[in-house]
Image (spheres, rainbow, N blue to C red):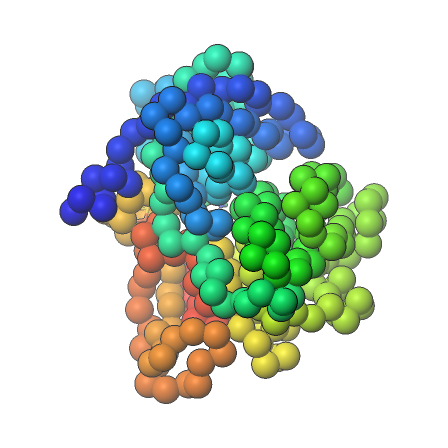
């Protein structure tokens, strides 16, 4: 109960910058007035609009947070994100964080190699993940894919990633998908982490499972309340006894899990990709 109240506690941030870093994609950094609670990579922020007709908060992944500043990278797709894109330095941003579970960082050990796979607007949470992993002396290879205009390249390099960029058009980097790069470059890791569109997550999960490993996927499904109180974000999860990386198949049950509360990160082997 206390946990739910903490998660719903509305914090105020003051916009430091809010710049368009690619067509229709903005990077907003806010200074935390109330102090930003510590967050794990893969957790997200519920951001409130000022428009009273848009009651529900918009979930945006934490791209970077150090307790003093919070950086979000978002694409403008509808009314809420369109409003965010108008914010100027000094404007207030009401938000609550951290939400969701985040990636399990203990799935990879110092000295091992982590593969980070991101597609489009799913790339932002990989930045904080990259910082956390390199700080633990885990080597990071990131493969990020876009339609035609990449972003967050310099920040990921600065965070220590060995970086591969793919675009559908071939305008920048490899022509093709993240999966094409994985296959063509024969890239492998000790642990895999992904965030992106469902179709990409499904494809990379199948690839990684075929290699005998499991992958943590962050599902950015459409949400409702953002706090576990409705069923706006459920997805089908095949629960295995002894769930975890490439766990042995035991008794399996399909259950509906809430992306906002039980996720957004799940094991790829557990997601029922052709389900809800
Ligand atoms: C856990 C999580 C983390 C997310 N992190 C990010 C992030 O870091 N950066 C970012 O840009 N976006 C992220 N999203 C998606 C973001 O929440 C939506 O784009 C946003 O809520 C849209 O709000 P809106 O008012 O602008 O659009 P709306 O008016 O609500 O919708 C506009 C259009 O976008 C579609 N849409 C809305 N939400 C989603 C969604 N989740 N997936 C696919 N289509 C959607 C609608 O169906 C509609 O067609 C995340 C979503 C989740 C669940
Ligand atoms: S958005 Fe309401 S339960 Fe997840």
> Residue at 61% of width from left, 71% of height from top?
190
Q: From the viewer's side, name the closer residue of 35 and 251.
A: 35
Q: Quadrant of residue 199?
A: bottom right
Q: Quadrant of residue 80?
A: top left
How many numbered marks does the figure carry? 0
Q: Could you tell whether 256 is left or right of 86 in the image?
A: left
Q: Does 171 sit above or below residue 246?
A: above
> Residue at 26% of width from left, 33% of height from top?
9
Tell me if residue 124 can be seen: yes
The x, y position of residue 89, in whole percent, is 53, 14
Q: Does 253 sit above or below residue 226?
A: below
The x, y position of residue 5, in whole percent, is 21, 39
Tell me if residue 129 can be seen: no
The x, y position of residue 128, in whole percent, is 55, 46
> Residue at 69% of width from left, 71% of height from top?
188
Q: Could you tell whether 136 is left or right of 242 in the image?
A: right
Q: Quadrant of the C terminus?
A: bottom left
> Residue at 72% of width from left, 45% of height from top?
157
Q: Quadrant of residue 250?
A: bottom left
The x, y position of residue 113, in whole percent, is 64, 66
Q: Residue furthest left?
A: 1
């Amino acid at each position: 109960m206390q946990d739910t109240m903490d998660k719903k506690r509305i914090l105020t941030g003051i916009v430091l910058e809010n710049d368009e870093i690619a067509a229709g994609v903005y990077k907003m950094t806010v200074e935390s007035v109330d102090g930003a609670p510590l967050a794990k990579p893969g957790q997200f922020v519920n951001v409130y609009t000022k428009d009273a007709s848009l009651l529900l908060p918009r979930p945006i992944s934490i791209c970077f947070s150090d307790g003093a500043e919070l950086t979000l990278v978002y694409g403008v797709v509808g009314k809420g994100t369109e409003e965010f894109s108008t914010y100027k330095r000094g404007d207030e941003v009401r938000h609550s964080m951290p939400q969701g579970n985040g990636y399990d960082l203990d799935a990879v050990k110092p000295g091992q190699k982590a593969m980070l796979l991101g597609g489009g607007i799913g790339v932002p949470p990989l930045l904080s993940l990259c910082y956390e992993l390199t700080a633990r002396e885990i080597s990071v290879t990131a493969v990020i894919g876009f339609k035609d205009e990449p972003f967050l390249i310099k920040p990921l390099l600065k965070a220590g990633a060995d970086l591969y960029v793919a675009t559908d058009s071939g305008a920048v980097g490899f022509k093709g998908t993240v999966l094409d790069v994985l296959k063509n470059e024969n890239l492998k890791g000790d642990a895999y982490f992904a965030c992106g569109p469902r179709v990409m997550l499904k494809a990379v999960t199948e690839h990684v499972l075929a290699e005998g490993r499991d992958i943590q996927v962050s599902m950015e499904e459409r949400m409702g309340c953002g706090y576990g109180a409705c069923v706006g974000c459920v997805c089908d999860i095949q629960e295995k006894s002894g769930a975890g990386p490439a766990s042995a198949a035991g008794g399996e049950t399909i259950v509906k899990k809430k992306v906002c509360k039980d996720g957004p990160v799940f094991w790829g082997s557990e997601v029922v990709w052709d389900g809800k």
